Image (spheres, rainbow, N blue to C red):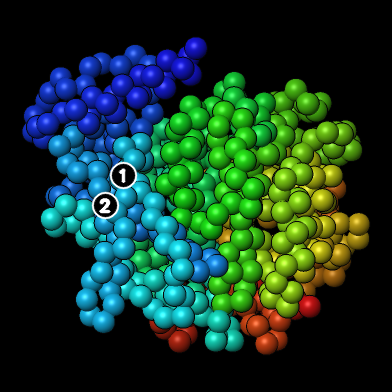
C-alpha cells in the first residue's frame, strides 16, 4: 500500500503541474503539501520545484534559452539513440523537444518527443542511420533553447580505437572538470565510458545528474558516450540488486533497492536510455528495467553489463564474521564459508548474454564494461587505520559467481574495464591458476578525497612474478582467496590524491590493448606529461 500511495500521489502531482497555466514567479500554492515518501526524493527538480530554496548542487532555475542541458548518444546497427536532458520546465512550458540534423548546410527536423517530468529527459530513436559520415545535430526546445553537437561516423577505418574511462564524480568537489575536458578532448577518444557514481547526492539524482552533465558535456557533445549508474546514483552506499527486490535499509546489504522503483527507473532512464537496446529487456522485480547490451565502435565490440543488479546481498545468507554483514576483518576466517551455494553475481541471464556475445563478431577485439572489479583489489579503505581483509561490495565475492563471470570474459578473449573502487589497478586475474583469466583495468576516481583506498600488502613485500615496476606488484590472494597478479596500482599518495582517468588504446592490427592512467592535474598537451608510475601497460589480446 505504501508503494501504491506513493505512485498515486506522484501521478496526481504531475497532473497538477500540467494543469497549471501560469508560469510561477513567486511562492505559490499550486502544488499542495505532500506527505508521501516522494516528498523526500528528487525534491530539487519535481513538483513545485520553482519554490525550492537555493541548494548546493546546482541552480535549476536557468534562463530559458539554456534549458536544454546536454545530450548523450550511441549508434548501433544503423540505429541512433539520443537522450536529450533538460533542466526542469515550468507548468506552462511545452514538453516537446525537437531533434534536427544538418544536411547540405540546412537544418532538417527528424523527430519531436515529449519530455518526462520525472528526470526531465526525452529519448530519440532514428533507424536507418547513415554511420559512414559525420552528422551535426541539435536538440531544440521552445523558441530559443538549443544544444548542438556531432554524431560521429563509425571509425571502422582507424587502426587504433581509443576509449576514455572515468568513474566516481564525488560531491566533495562541486567545481568544474575543465582539466579533464581539456585533456580528454586533446587525446580525442572515439568513445567515452562513465562507469558509475556520476551522482553522489543519493536522493537528488536529477540535480546531481544535471551537475555532472554540465561538468562533462564538452566531452560527449561530439562523440558517443556510455553512462551506467552505480550504487550512489540510485541512492545507496552499496548495492546488491538481487533481481530488484525491496531492500530494508539504505545500506542494502540484505539485497535490493531501497528507494521507490519509480526513482530507480528514472535514474536508469536518464543514464542508459541512449544505449543500444537491451539483450533481453525483461524487467526484474518492482518493474525495474535492465540495460545490459553491446556496442560496436570501430570494430571494437563492447559488452555493457550490470554487475550489481542481480548480485546476492550478504546479510542473512552467510555467516556474519565482522561488525558488518559485508566486511570481514579477520584474516584467519575460512573464505569457503562465505561462498554459499545459490549465491549469484551476474545471474544466469547476463552469463548467457556474455557467452553468446563471446561467440559473435569473431575477429573483433572484445571489451567488457561494468561498474566494479572482479576481486578485492584494495587492503585499506577510507583511511590508513581501516585495514579490511575482505569486502563483499567488490565482485571478488561470491567466489563461484566471480569465477563464472571471469570464465565468460576469458572465453570471449575480452579485457575488462571498470571503476567504483577509487583505486586504479591493472590486474591479471586467475581462476584456477594464476594468470589463466582476463586482464582488468579499474580506472581511478574523478575525485578521490571522498573514500580513498590503498593497495598495501601487510608484509609490504612484492609477490611472485612481479613486473618490478612498483614495490608491491606480483601474485597475491585477495581476501576471498581469489588469485590475482597486480601489475599497477595508484595509491592516494600519488599526484592529485590518485584521482584521474583511464585511456585505453586498442590496436586492431597488433591485437593489443594499452592501459594509460592520467592524473587529474596532468596537461597531456605537454610533450613531457607523465602518467602515474607503473603506466602505461600493454597486453596482448590473442
Q: Nearer the viewer, residue 408 or 166?
A: 408
| Residue at figure coordinates x 72%, y 61% from the top left | 357
Helix, strand or loop at mark 1: loop
Note whether 484 is above or below 128 in the view shown.
above
Question: Are there few (<14), some (14-19), or many (20+) residues within 10 Å of tag 1?
Answer: many
Q: Position of residue 260 (x, y in %)?
A: 48, 27
| Residue at figure coordinates x 81%, y 26% from the top left | 319
Q: Nearer the viewer, residue 452 or 37?
A: 37
Note whether 100 is above or below 448 in the view shown.
below
Relative horizontal placement of residue 60, taking residue 338 as reference (left or right):
left
Relative horizontal placement of residue 487, taking residue 336 as reference (left or right):
left
Note whether 266 is above or below 317 in the view shown.
below
**Marks 1,2: beta carbons within 8 A:** yes
Tell me where residue 65 sits by quadrant.
bottom left
- Residue where numbered disc 2 is placed: 97
Task: Give the quarter of the figure containing the C terminus.
Answer: bottom right
Q: Position of residue 304 (x, y in %)?
A: 61, 57
Q: Position of residue 184 (x, y in %)?
A: 43, 72
Note whether 14 is above or below 62 in the view shown.
above
Question: Gap in Å between the C-alphas at discs 1 and 2?
Answer: 7 Å
Work out whether residue 41 can be spotted: yes
Q: How many marks?
A: 2
Relative horizontal placement of residue 353, taking residue 318 as reference (left or right):
left
- Which of the marked residues, 1 or 2, is nearer the chain's N terminus? 2
| Residue at figure coordinates x 25%, y 48% from the top left | 96
Helix, strand or loop at mark 2: strand
Q: Position of residue 192 (x, y in %)?
A: 49, 66
Work out whether residue 213 can be spotted: no
| Residue at figure coordinates x 45%, y 33% from the top left | 263
- Residue where numbered disc 1 is placed: 115
Amino acid at each position: 500500500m505504501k508503494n501504491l500511495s506513493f505512485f498515486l500521489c506522484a501521478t496526481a502531482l504531475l497532473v497538477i503541474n500540467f494543469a497549471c497555466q501560469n508560469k510561477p514567479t513567486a511562492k505559490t500554492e499550486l502544488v499542495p503539501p505532500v506527505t508521501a515518501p516522494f516528498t523526500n526524493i528528487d525534491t530539487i527538480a519535481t513538483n513545485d520545484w520553482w519554490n525550492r530554496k537555493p541548494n548546493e548542487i546546482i541552480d535549476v532555475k536557468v534562463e530559458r534559452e539554456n534549458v536544454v542541458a546536454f545530450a548523450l548518444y550511441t549508434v548501433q546497427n544503423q540505429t541512433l539513440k539520443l537522450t536529450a536532458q533538460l533542466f526542469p520546465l515550468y507548468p506552462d512550458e511545452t514538453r516537446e523537444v525537437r531533434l534536427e540534423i544538418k544536411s547540405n548546410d540546412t537544418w532538417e527536423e527528424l523527430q519531436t518527443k515529449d519530455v518526462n517530468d520525472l528526470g526531465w529527459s526525452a529519448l530519440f530513436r532514428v533507424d536507418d542511420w547513415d554511420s559512414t559520415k559525420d552528422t551535426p545535430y541539435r536538440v531544440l526546445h521552445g523558441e530559443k533553447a538549443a544544444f548542438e553537437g556531432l554524431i560521429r561516423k563509425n571509425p571502422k577505418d582507424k587502426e587504433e580505437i581509443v576509449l576514455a574511462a572515468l568513474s566516481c564524480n564525488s560531491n566533495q568537489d562541486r567545481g568544474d572538470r575543465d582539466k579533464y575536458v581539456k585533456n580528454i578532448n586533446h587525446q580525442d577518444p572515439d568513445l567515452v565510458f562513465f562507469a558509475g557514481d556520476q551522482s553522489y547526492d543519493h536522493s537528488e539524482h536529477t540535480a546531481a545528474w544535471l551537475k555532472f552533465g554540465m561538468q562533462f558535456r564538452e566531452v560527449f557533445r561530439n562523440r558517443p558516450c556510455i553512462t551506467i549508474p552505480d550504487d550512489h546514483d540510485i541512492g545507496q552506499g552499496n548495492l546488491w540488486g538481487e533481481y530488484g527486490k525491496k531492500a530494508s535499509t539504505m545500506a542494502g546489504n540484505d539485497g535490493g533497492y531501497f528507494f521507490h522503483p519509480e526513482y530507480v527507473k528514472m535514474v536508469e532512464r536518464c543514464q542508459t536510455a541512449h544505449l543500444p537496446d537491451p539483450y533481453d529487456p525483461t524487467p526484474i522485480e518492482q518493474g525495474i528495467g535492465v540495460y545490459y547490451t553491446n556496442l560496436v565502435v570501430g570494430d571494437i565490440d563492447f559488452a555493457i553489463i550490470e554487475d550489481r543488479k542481480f548480485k546476492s546481498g550478504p546479510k542473512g545468507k552467510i555467516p556474519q564474521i565482522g561488525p558488518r554483514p559485508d566486511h570481514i576483518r579477520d584474516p584467519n576466517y575460512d573464505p569457503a564459508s562465505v561462498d554459499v551455494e545459490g549465491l549469484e553475481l551476474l545471474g544466469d541471464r547476463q552469463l548467457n548474454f556474455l557467452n553468446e556475445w563471446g561467440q559473435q563478431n569473431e575477429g573483433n577485439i572484445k571489451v567488457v564494461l561494468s561498474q566494479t572489479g572482479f576481486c578485492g583489489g584494495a587492503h585499506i579503505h577510507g583511511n590508513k587505520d581501516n585495514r579490511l581483509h575482505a569486502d563483499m561490495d567488490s565482485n571478488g565475492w561470491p567466489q563461484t559467481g566471480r569465477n563464472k563471470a571471469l570464465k565468460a570474459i576469458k572465453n570471449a578473449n575480452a579485457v575488462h574495464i571498470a571503476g567504483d573502487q577509487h583505486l586504479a589497478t591493472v590486474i591479471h586475474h586467475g581462476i584456477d591458476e594464476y594468470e589463466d583469466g582476463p586482464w582488468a583495468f579499474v580506472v581511478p576516481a574523478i575525485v578521490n578525497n571522498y573514500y580513498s583506498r590503498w593497495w598495501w600488502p601487510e608484509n609490504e613485500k612484492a609477490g611472485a612474478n612481479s613486473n618490478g615496476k612498483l614495490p608491491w606488484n606480483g601474485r597475491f590472494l585477495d581476501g576471498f582467496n581469489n588469485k590475482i597478479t597486480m601489475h599497477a596500482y595508484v595509491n592516494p599518495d600519488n599526484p592529485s590524491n590518485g584521482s584521474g582517468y583511464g585511456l585505453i588504446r586498442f590496436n586492431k592490427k597488433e591485437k593489443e590493448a594499452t592501459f594509460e592512467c592520467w592524473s587529474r592535474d596532468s596537461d597531456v598537451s605537454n610533450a613531457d606529461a607523465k602518467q602515474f608510475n607503473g603506466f602505461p601497460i600493454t597486453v596482448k589480446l590473442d
